Amino acid sequence: MHYLMEHIDRYLMACRELTAFCAQNGWIDNKTLDYEILEQNDRYVLAFVQFDEILMEGGGSIASRIPHQGRLRLTLDRYGQVARTELL
């Protein structure tokens, strides 16, 4: 279980699918990225994910942060690695 959590942590930090939750073409603040496993078996993990979307001003400073949340199904391969992500 601990190994799976570490793998999911690393995976979500680089997961491009999470940008589908972003509303205004900002980017994900990885420092705020958090998740909770709702369900798990040998084939998939259902997770509830939360993070802040960062929006920038023209001068390069942060204009605002928008909180987002959503559910994901992380399909696992036979080695327990994430093979595919679906937004739910």
Image (tube, helix red, strand yellow):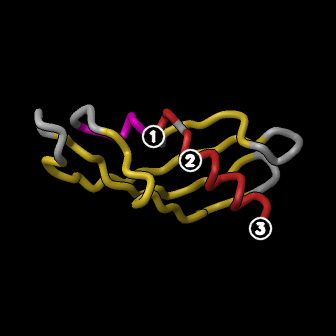
Q: Quadrant of the N terminus?
A: bottom right
**Would you say the residues marked 2 and 3 are in contact, meaning their CB atoms lie under 8 Å apart?**
no
**Would you say the residues marked 1 and 2 are in contact, meaning their CB atoms lie under 8 Å apart?**
yes
- The residue that label 3 is drawn on is 2
Image-based side of 80 in relation to 54, left or right: right
Percent position of residue 87, x then y:
49, 39
Image-based side of 35 in relation to 80, left or right: left
The image quarter in which residue 18 lies:
top left
Q: Amino acid at mark 2?
A: Leu
Q: Amino acid at mark 3?
A: His
| The stretch drawn in magenta includes residue 22 | yes
Image-based side of 34 in relation to 54, left or right: right
Residue found at the very far front of the displayed protein? 59
| The stretch drawn in magenta includes residue 64 | no
Image-based side of 36 in relation to 43, left or right: left
Q: Is residue 78 above or below residue 48?
A: above
Crowd band around label 3 with a 10 angstrom C-alpha radius: few (<14), some (14–19), many (20+): few
**Residue shown at the point (64%, 50%) measured from the top left:** 10
CA gap, disc 1 to disc 2? Answer: 8 Å
In-front residue for pair 27/73: 27
CA gap, disc 2 to disc 3? Answer: 16 Å
Which structural element holds mark 1?
Answer: helix
- The residue that label 2 is drawn on is 12
- The residue that label 1 is drawn on is 18
**Magenta region, residue range:** 19-23
Question: Could you tell me what secondary structure mostly forms the magenta stretch?
Answer: helix
Q: Amino acid at mark 1?
A: Leu
Dot placed on the residue nearer the N-terminal end, 2 or 3: 3
Crowd band around label 1 with a 10 angstrom C-alpha radius: few (<14), some (14–19), many (20+): many
**Residue shown at the point (44%, 53%) measured from the top left:** 30
Percent position of residue 61, x then y:
17, 45
